Image (spheres, rainbow, N blue to C red):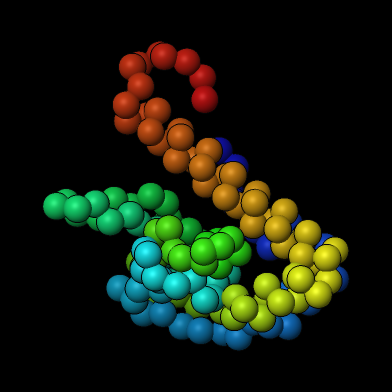
Amino acid sequence: MTSSPTLTAALATEHRDRLMSFAHEVFFDVGTRLCEEGRHADRFWIIKTGTVALYLHVPGRRAAVIESLGHGELVGWSWHFPPHLWHLSAEATSPVWAYEFDADAVRTLCEQDPEFGRAVAVWVGRVVAHRLHAARVRLLDLYAPYGSGRT
């Protein structure tokens, strides 16, 4: 399976540079929760170094790790779609350096510059599509009868 669409691969240089003008570097130690399922999605991150686990709360059980993200990958897409609430939680599983973005500021720029907004929407949409496909493949690995078909 291919990796998630990174910012470098997804956005033209002019759009990438414009987005990065909103970035500031942050550090998360192991075990730091970046976002929590159901809370307001007011920022997002692009990982420089380290790994972040995406997980889903399962009542009465341990949290289910959905995916592990690394260098260049987007952490959080819920900021882009109303009602701007996190669909998953994210936690640093190693020391993480990341670029952090203010979601309101980026959404405002997307509204002001439709070409930029379209580029960001396509990038975020590709990330969502990739993650949905990856989740489908994992579910098939877990629950489909052996040899039941291709993904």
Residue 81, x across and y down, in percent: 58, 61
Left or right of 43 on screen, residue 123 = right
Is residue 47 in view from this perspective? no
Looking at the image, which residue is at 57% across and 50% down? 128
| Residue nearer the viewer, 104 or 126 | 104
Q: Vertically, is 85 above or below 112?
A: above
Q: Which of 57 and 147 is in front in this view?
A: 57
| Residue 115 x/y as whole percent | 85, 63
Left or right of 151 in this view: 24: right
Q: Closest to the observer: 138 or 109?
A: 109
Give the residue drawn at x 44%, y 64%: 86
Q: Quadrant of residue 110?
A: bottom right
On screen, residue 23 above or below 13 = below
Q: Is residue 87 visible?
A: yes
Which residue, as the protein is rendered here, is positioned at the far front?
83
Provide residue 123's location: percent of width, then percent of height: 69, 56
Q: Where is residue 111 in the image (x, y as percent from the top left)?
A: 76, 71
